[in-house]
Amino acid sequence: MGTIEIRKTSITALDTDAVVNAANNGLLAGGGVCGAIFKAAGYEQLQDACRKLGRCDTGSAVITPGFRLKPRYIIHAVGPRWRDGRHGEPELLYGAYEKALALAAANHCKSVGFPLISAGIFGYPVQDAWAQAFRACGDFLDRHRDTPLDIVFAVLSDEILEAGRRALLRSGASRYKIAERNDWKRLDMPEQQDSFLFRRPFTAEQMAALRRGSIPQEMEDKWFWFMEGDTLFAHRSWTGYCIYRIDFRPDQNHLVTVNRNPEQYGCTSAAEDAQNLNKLLNWWTQDDYDYYHEWLSETADMLEKAEKGKNA
């Protein structure tokens, strides 16, 4: 399962396998994103590679080496100039993203960085540009679930960053979004807390699943969790209370801090916490987290405990 992330950074600072240049039809050095990429990659080498390709149609993309950039490749995608939205602009913008993503996948990239194509001097309205970007990216990730691709958007403006985060949460691609602390209501861990060491190894794939986090989608989805650095924060979705904080350690002896406020969380035993946490992590580290069946499993456990209590 791929991911979609938006960062406030220069696209030339990304360390993805490929970055996308907001190119023009002639593949010439320009201003904005295009000029920054040419400067960072090395103007003469990149211009020579582009000259050999000749041109690129609007709504399509071509690829060159990354030269002096950290990414191995530069994918040059040509978005449309905005007129009024009735001259094929949405389809052409979708095509530019689709072709760029296809080139990244065909060249065995695991990650790709994008600017917000056409939203600069080409004049595409920002909200519409975000909506089309996420539609194209979500559709691509849906069609290629067996070859996940992590997608990073690099923007320089706080306003465009926040517009993108709001648009991503509203879009059908929201399930691919990397969860962040402000994506859901949350309350910090109270002073009433306990800590214990929790030993469990995690594969790279399992840690990647945890780093995606989870933003609640339905009533049955009981947890909102996100990671910052090597620390995971797990909150109850309906109250926002932080129940677990897990500091992951290279030696696999992870430090767990647990909420001990009885009005927020009922467990009082570190042993029971470790057992509960193991079950949760089994669900959360699935490649495609299934909150509904997690909820069914927890409900069945509660009913079984209640039945045993009645018969005791």
Image: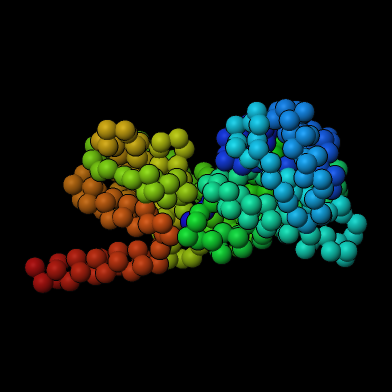
Q: Position of residue 214 (x, y in %)?
A: 47, 53
- The vertical placement of 175 against 232, above or below, is below
Residue for point 81% across, 42% down: 27
Colour logic: rainbow
Viewer can see residue 255: no
The quarter of the displayed image where residue 279 is located? bottom left
* Viewer-closest of 65 and 139: 65
Q: Where is residue 67 in the image (x, y as percent from the top left)?
A: 66, 31
Residue for point 63% across, 40% down: 73
Residue for point 77% across, 34% down: 48
Residue for point 8% across, 68% down: 312
**Horizontal relation, residue 148 to residue 73: left or right:** left
* Viewer-closest of 209 and 160: 209
| Labels in figure, total | 0
Q: Position of residue 294 (x, y in %)?
A: 35, 63
Q: Residue furthest left?
A: 312
**Horizontal relation, residue 289 to residue 184: left or right:** left
**Horizontal relation, residue 113 to residue 311: left or right:** right
Viewer can see residue 179: yes
Q: Position of residue 298 (x, y in %)?
A: 30, 64
The quarter of the displayed image where residue 292 is located? bottom left
**Horizontal relation, residue 133 to residue 299: left or right:** right
The quarter of the displayed image where residue 96 is located? bottom right
Q: Residue furthest right?
A: 83
